[in-house]
Amino acid sequence: MFNSFAIAVALAVAIAFANPTFAHSTIKSTVPASGSVLPSSPTRVEITFNEPARLTRAVVVGADKVERRLEISPSGSATTFFLEQPALKRGRNEIRWKALSRDGHPIDGSIVLVIKADAIPSAALEQDRGH
Amino acid sequence: MTLEVLAALLKWLLYGGALASAGAVFARMALGVQAGEAGTAMCRIITAGAGLATAAAVGTTLVLLTRLGGIFESGALAAVWLGPAGLAAGLQLGGGLAMLLSSIFNGRFGWSLAGAVAMLASFGISGHAASLNVPSGLIVVFHAAAAAWWLGALFILRRACIALSNVELLCLVRRFSRLAEGIIGAMVAAGVLLILALVKLPLELTPYLVALSAKIALAGAVLALAVYNRLSLTPKLASSGHAAARRALGLTIGIEIAVIAAVLAATAILTSLTSPHQ
């Protein structure tokens, strides 16, 4: 009986301390940050999660309401992803993304970037936090 | 119905089918019920449970792909099939098919057992606890296996209340009780360890905690019924009032099975609609 108790205690300690970080991935930051007003389209958009995740789909919806797919790199599991050459148009652009969290939850969110020809580049008031 | 709610519903059906089929495999082995009418009844439960679990696993995977961008979306397909979610789905499909085919074609018991193990192992690969670390994943598998055995044994006992003689029923109930004390006790201990791993202090009234509390309350109700059966009804089976005790036992076992179904629904909500990290 003591052996069983000792094994249970060892398991409890192993569980409690083996991995102190949570597994549910959430957005840590985006570059440019959501809400930014830019004079021209960025050459790429960077999305960083707090834990490894798998970004599965990213589309941009412009002021014309037309949806356009964006290429994601790297493929597979990573903490930071890049959307190269998003070619954002003038006006409001919403980048909608979907990802698979490490614990198997589907997560999604959006990044809003406004392209305004005479804008002075500004940081967003708050970063995109997604789900 | 939103995709989130559909995912939870499919998860409930998956849990129910998996535990019923795997539990019937384990329990009939442990309680020595292989041949005769009882063995045939267990085969039917394995067939129905495995079929339900397999179909629910397919549905769950399709819903997940849809939520990630689309069934034919290359990014979604890669994320699911090249990761833990895909491995879990593969084990559920393979395990379900193994149990289903073995049961339909009166195949070798080894196939049923392998299928049951694969099905339950899938729950330790993807999910809140599984993504923490390997010990947590193993404890989830153990917790699910013990719960499956309990459910399978209840199916056997309920059938026995109708079909067996009083002497045979009493013998079976005593055999079950001897095993149940250890297995159910270990199941509860595993559940406590998982709560310690997933719920962090200080406690906050989150949807996860509400759903977890509901699951614990329902599980407590099943345990209370089990204790009532053990302490009150089982001794009466050996007495002169055994006919009434037999009927009452059949009724309370039926209620236990129904409440276990509710426990699985709470678990599906926990794993699909909430997160311990919110």
Image: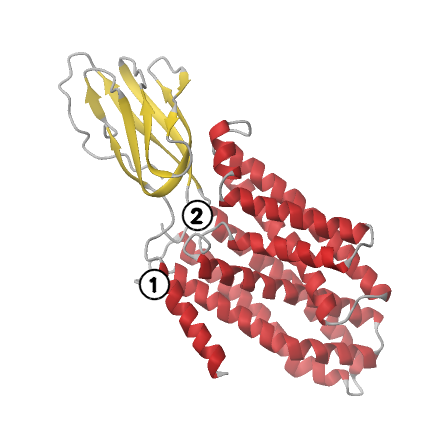
Q: x%, y% of residue B243?
A: 81, 79
Residue at x-position 60% and y-position 77%:
B181
Q: Quadrant of residue A64?
A: top left
Mark 2 closeness class: few <14, some 14–19, many ≥20 residues within 10 Å: many
Q: Which badge, 2 or 1, is on the more N-terminal residue?
A: 1
Q: What numbered label is drawn on residue B217?
A: none
Q: What numbered label is drawn on residue A103?
A: 2
Seen in the picture, residue A95 relative to B263 is either above or below; the reply is above
Q: x%, y% of residue B207?
A: 41, 52
Q: Chain letter of disc 1?
A: A
Numbered disc 2: secondary structure: loop
Hey, what amino acid is under mark 2?
Answer: Asp
Would residue B139 appear left or right of A23 to someone viewing this image?
right
Mark 1 closeness class: few <14, some 14–19, many ≥20 residues within 10 Å: few
Q: Quadrant of residue B173?
A: bottom right
For disc 1, the marked residue is: A17
Q: Chain letter of disc 2?
A: A
Seen in the picture, residue B268 relative to B77 is either above or below; the reply is below
